[in-house]
Amino acid sequence: MKDGDTPANSMDVCTALATRRSVRDFRPDRVPEALIDDILSDALNAPSWGNVQPYRVAVASGDVAKAISADYMHHFTEGGRFQKASAMGKLKMWLSGFRGPDGDHTTIMTYPDELNERYRETGKGIYGVLGIGREDKAARVRQMARNFEFFGAPTALFIFASEELGAYGPLDAGAFIQSIALAAHARGLGTCAQAALATWASPVRSRFEVPSGYKLICGMALGYASDAPINSFAPVRRTAENVKLSLKS
């Protein structure tokens, strides 16, 4: 957006922060390329250390998005087969060319107790809205697979951050990602930042020219939210009081 322009669906930043939600079910309606560019232009106003803006974005829509999704689904399905296979079955898959995740960062981690409590509560809330029981493993796998279909969104963004700045590349990229989410929300669109899309990098790297030194940090579904109940889910947020550190006695 150019200086002085005001988007038709603009809202103040406090309202945007309070009402933005991660969208997990999208309508298939195409998002115009010009609108995507406006959102990215707005997001480029995000704070950046020394204004270096150490990020790049791959924008996938239409047939490109479908092809990338198909690659992800293949990797996800094969990964599930590998996990269930016997030792001999795993060896055969490996010898036939199977390889595990090729992401630039690992997306599988162990959360410390404090963080795991919130992570588990959020997962419990999402599956509760979806009506998926803890014992229904097949339904949980199907819902996980929805990540790789971008939850039905017609566009997926893939954010790469420079590794040359250590922690500060991802730090700046995080501010950029939040700004994309807010700029999209203000214009009537929904987003969902997806770490799962960083599990494999090859589906994106094989189709886009990624500069040396840039690593895929996450993907983001972008589109128009459906009226599915899951889109009303709002996890409990921490309060200002419990994020502030206490003074030493």
Image (cartoon, grey):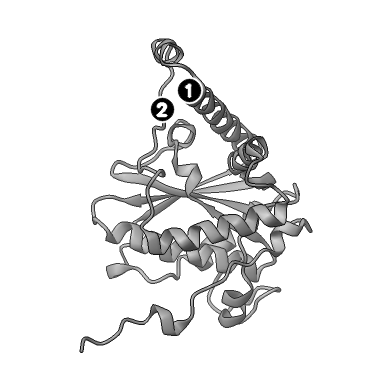
Residue 248 pos. (x, y %): 21, 86
Closer to the camera in the image, 167 or 114: 114
107 w.r.t. 238: above or below: above
245 and 4: which one is in front? 245
The percent coordinates of residue 175 (x first, y second) are: 42, 66
Query: Label 2 sits on what residue type?
Result: Gly
Earlier residue among tags 1 and 2: 1
**Viewer-nearest residue: 225 or 61:** 225
Residue 18 percent coordinates (x, y): 60, 77
Residue at 50%, 44% in the rendered image = 196
Label 2 crowd bin: few (<14), some (14–19), many (20+), radius 10 Å: few
Residue at 69% across, 47% down: 132
Instruction: Work out whether residue 223 or residue 144 is closer to the camera in this orientation and state it.
Output: 144
The residue singled out by tag 1 in the image is 82
Which residue type carries mark 1?
A: Phe
The answer to whether one can see residue 154 in this image is no
The x, y position of residue 123, in whole percent, is 57, 55
Using the image, determine if residue 98 lies above or below residue 212.
above
Residue that protrudes farthest toward the right in the picture: 227
Q: Residue furthest front?
A: 135
